């Protein structure tokens, strides 16, 4: 993912003061650490927890996003003010910094809204009085997360297609937890995240498998492998393919599975997140097993598929034996 930063600005959201502090000067993108920080934060918006969708063409947020192309500073202030008017109504939403970034990705202009919450951190402070120099320990309550961490909330928007990737959190509004960002700020219902869709599939498959006496171990392993293959092939989860893989020749179970996942909130044809195959590789590219005797195994999908390397044997007494084969070397790592 090659990101070319064009413009960026930082606005301060101090809940104690009650009003945003809007910057009138853009960030200096010739400074290396600023470029690295913003680029890393944008890249980390895409994950298995990220939701996707498309903004309403005539919506307020989409209009402000597009206005940033010609009037960046003012548009960024309007965008943050719109967001803050809703955010400040929360009882528990914390203080934060908001970065608005205009950047080019795959020859298209994009806009990022990155909210980074404050954290407490200890540091030293050098003071001097009539007694001499005093080195003190103090708490700084406005420390930002490092560049390796994700933004606490974020949205990136393709300004041509108005498609977006969204990371949002629930905060307390009038005593109830709410996903205020999608419900009130962008006023668009996103599709479920990759992780949410997989959780629905896994939960339903376990329930259907139990009804038809399928082994839960086999069901979960088949789901993970089928999800991985589906994303590798088409960039999305194909629930019909998963049904046929998990329940094989049981047509009744397949039909029950397909009906149930839709009722539980699974959405097909979800706009894919960027780098979806790389994310799938990290998230679903390994089978993880925890056994009743305390042994844990992490097995790459390609190895799991190869009976010459690993085999699960069902014993007559109902126990399972795991045979690991053709190992050239065993490393013991602390």
Image: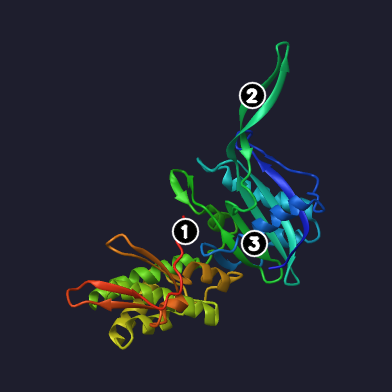
Residue at disc 1, secondary structure: loop
Residue at 70% across, 45% down: 11
* Residue 175 placement: quadrant: top left
The residue where tag 1 is placed is 333
**Percent from the top left, x then y, of residue 331?**
46, 64
What x and y, as percent, mark residue 138? 61, 28
Question: Does the residue at mark 3 contact the one at mark 1 (Cβ under 8 Å)?
Answer: no
Of badges 2 and 1, the one in the foreground is 1
Q: Residue 43: which disc?
A: 3
Cβ–Cβ under 8 Å for marks 3 and 2: no
User: Label 1 near label 2: C-beta < 8 Å?
Assistant: no
- Nearest the viewer among 64 and 152 is 152
Neighbour tally class for label 1: few under 14, some 14-19, many 20 plus, Cα within 10 Å: few
Q: CA distance from mark 2 to mark 1?
A: 41 Å
How far is disc 3 from disc 2 in space, using C-alphas? 38 Å
Image quarter of residue 93: top right
- The reply, left or right, for residue 196 in relation to residue 289 is right
Q: Earlier in the sequence, mark 2 or mark 1?
A: 2
Residue at left offset 62%, top offset 50%: 115
| Residue of label 2 | 136
Q: Where 291 falls versus 16 (above or below)?
A: below
Placement of 89 over or under 329, stated as above or below: above
């Amino acid at each position: 993912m090659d990101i070319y930063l064009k413009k960026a600005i930082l606005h301060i959201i101090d809940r104690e003061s009650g009003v945003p502090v809007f910057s009138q000067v853009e960030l200096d993108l010739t400074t290396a650490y600023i470029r690295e920080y913003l680029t890393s934060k944008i890249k980390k918006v895409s994950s298995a927890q990220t939701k996707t969708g498309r903004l309403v063409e005539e919506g307020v947020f989409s209009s402000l996003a597009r206005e940033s192309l010609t009037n960046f500073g003012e548009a960024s202030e309007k965008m943050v003010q719109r967001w803050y008017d809703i955010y400040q109504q929360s009882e528990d939403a914390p203080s934060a910094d908001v970065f608005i970034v205009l950047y080019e990705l795959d020859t298209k202009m994009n806009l990022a809204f990155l909210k980074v919450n404050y954290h407490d951190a200890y540091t030293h402070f050098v003071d001097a009085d009539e007694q001499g120099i005093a080195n003190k320990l103090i708490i700084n309550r406005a420390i930002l997360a490092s560049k390796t961490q994700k933004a606490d909330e974020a949205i990136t928007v393709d300004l041509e297609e108005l498609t977006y990737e969204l990371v949002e959190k629930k905060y307390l509004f009038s005593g109830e937890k709410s996903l205020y960002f999608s419900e009130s700020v962008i006023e668009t219902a996103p599709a479920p995240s990759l992780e949410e869709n997989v959780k629905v599939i896994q939960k339903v498959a376990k329930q259907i498998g139990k009804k038809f006496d399928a082994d839960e171990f086999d069901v979960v392993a088949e789901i993970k492998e089928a999800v991985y293959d589906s994303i590798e092939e088409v960039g999305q989860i194909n629930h019909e393919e998963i049904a046929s893989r998990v329940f094989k020749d049981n047509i009744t179970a397949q039909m029950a599975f397909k009906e149930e996942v839709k009722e539980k909130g699974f959405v097909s044809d979800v706009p894919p997140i960027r780098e979806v195959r790389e994310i799938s590789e990290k998230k679903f590219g390994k089978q993880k097993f925890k056994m009743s005797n305390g042994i844990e195994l992490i097995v790459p999908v390609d190895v799991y598929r190869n009976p010459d390397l690993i085999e699960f044997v069902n014993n007559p007494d109902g126990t399972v034996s795991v045979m690991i084969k053709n190992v050239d070397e065993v490393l013991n790592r602390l």
